[in-house]
Structures are given as C-alpha cells and as structure tokens.
Amino acid sequence: MEQFWQKLTSFAFPRTEETAISYKIEANHPLITAGLSEKTIHYLQRLVGAPGINLPIYLTALTHRSVVHDPATPSIIESNQRLEFLGDSVLDLLISEYLFNRFPESAEGELSSNRAKIVNRKSLAGFAQSIALGEHLLIGESADEHKIRTSESALADAFESLIGAIYLDKGIEQASNFISHHIIEHVNFNTIVASEQNYKSRLIEYTQSHHLPPPVYSVIEEVGAEHEKSFTIGVTCTDQLLGQGTAQRKKDAEQLAAKEAMERLATEENNWN
C-alpha cells in the first residue's frame, strides 16, 4: 500500500521551495487584491497544518464560479470546479481505503453504500460548516452572497476543492490527514454512516434482484444562470420513467430521482400484494 501511495503522489504537481509561498505576504500582493484576505490566509495555514502553503491553489479552491462570470473581477478566470473534480477523486480513494480496512467483512455493495453516505452533498456541506469554510468563499458581487455561503452545493464543492488543493500542494499524506481529522474523526461521522440513504445504490440493487436493466439517468431540463443553474434529471428503466428530481447539482438531482423511483416501486409492489 505504501508503494501505491508513493506512485500516486508522484502524479501531483511538483512541490518545491519556489512554489511554496509563505502566508505572510504584502497587502498589495495580487492574491490580496484578488480577494484573499489576511484572515483567510491565516485560516488556511491553520487548516492545512503545514508551513509554506501554495496560496494560488487555495485561492482557486475558494473561488465560487460566480466570480468568474462577474465583470468586477476580470483578473480571476478560474473557479474551483476543476479542483472539485480532483478533490472528489482523492476523497473517494481515501474514504474507500478507510472503509476497506475498517469493515473487513463488508461486501462490495455495502462498502459502496457507506462511501456514498459519507461523500454526498449533505454530508460534505456539514463537514464544510464545521470548519466555517463558507465564511472564506470568494463570491461574485452580482451573486446572492448569503445564499451561496450557506448553500449545500457550494459548501460541498468548496470542501472537495480544498481537498484537491491540499493534495496538489502537500501530497496524498497531508490530504489523508485532513480527511481523517475533519471527516473520519468528525462527531457526526458514525451517525452519517448509519443513517444516510443512497437511493441510487438501492435502485441498482432493486433492478439487479428483479433481473431488470440498470437504471439510466438523463437531464430533462436545465434552468438558471451559469453560476446558479439547477438540473432536473429523470431515471428510466426499460424505457419507463420511474422518477425525477431537481437540484443545483446533477448528482443530487439523480439521488432525488432515484428516491422517487424507489418510492414508486415500493407503492406498486404493495398494490400487487
């Protein structure tokens, strides 16, 4: 396993003294004028728990997509969406390893279900709230600042982006330390594993047990501006629409669609019986 982590870490961006920027920077530094306050810099330094953090990466991790579309901030051209993609993968890998070791008797389906309970939007937003991440997000002036700072979707995205930034800046070990401290050791961790439902996994299990084709998810409608878009997604099986859901993230809309599908299937089974 140690050799695997070493290979994985080698894919990260090189971390040298030249790329590691001290958190003590001048007031007129571009990072400050772009919106990264001294308070946020100290916050990041404490959160990462390692000296010499690469501030530009964390600036991107905290940048909501509304900033990129705001004419008041023309110098910022990248939001945290790419880092969110990377952080999502790092998080999945590290949580998978943790669950694999913690539950040696669990089958693949149960491990997948438990992982989904931990890394869903609601859980990640809760972890983000526990470290007051919303207070440090960079948000476009034309956007609803209060709504975004408390948005489940925005908080979850920023939390995953932060994990991606830590991975790029400090490597897989520091990312693992962050996840252990702020997710696995979180006071609500065991409750989340025990209580949250993954409707997509349940729907797959249902179709398999009834010898049906796997469910197919498709976008029915997209509404809203680029930085505040919502998605309506439907789930079908054998060309029959079983359910649909609407949310700001496709993953959440899929879960809602699967939930509606499971409720419908349960009702139909009760009627047959």
Image (tube, helix red, strand yellow):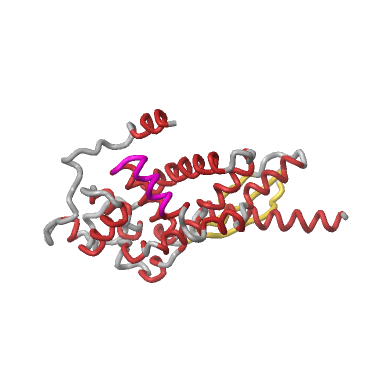
Residue 98 in the figure: left or right of residue 235:
left
In front of the other: 240 or 110: 110
User: Picture coordinates of residue 72 (x, y %)?
Assistant: 24, 63
Residue 32 in the figure: left or right of residue 193:
left
Q: Which residues are magenta?
A: 170-181
Q: How many marks?
A: 0
Residue extending farthest to the bottom is 146
* Residue plotted at (52% across, 52% down): 118
Image quarter in which the C terminus is found: bottom right
User: Picture coordinates of residue 109 (x, y %)?
Assistant: 64, 41
* Residue plotted at (51% across, 60% down): 188
Determine which quarter of the picture holds residue 105: top right
- Asked if the magenta segment contains residue 104, the reply would be no
Residue 18 in the figure: left or right of residue 244:
left
* Residue plotted at (57% across, 54% down): 193
* Residue plotted at (30% across, 50% down): 78
Residue extending farthest to the right is 273
Looking at the magenta stretch, what is its main secondary structure? Answer: helix
Image vertical order of residue 205 relative to residue 227, above or below: above
User: Picture coordinates of residue 234 (x, y %)?
Assistant: 62, 52
Image quarter in which the N terminus is found: top left
- Asked if the magenta segment contains residue 177, the reply would be yes
Determine which quarter of the picture holds residue 35: bottom left
User: Picture coordinates of residue 162 (x, y %)?
Assistant: 35, 51
In front of the other: 81 or 100: 100
Image vertical order of residue 172 relative to residue 200, above or below: above
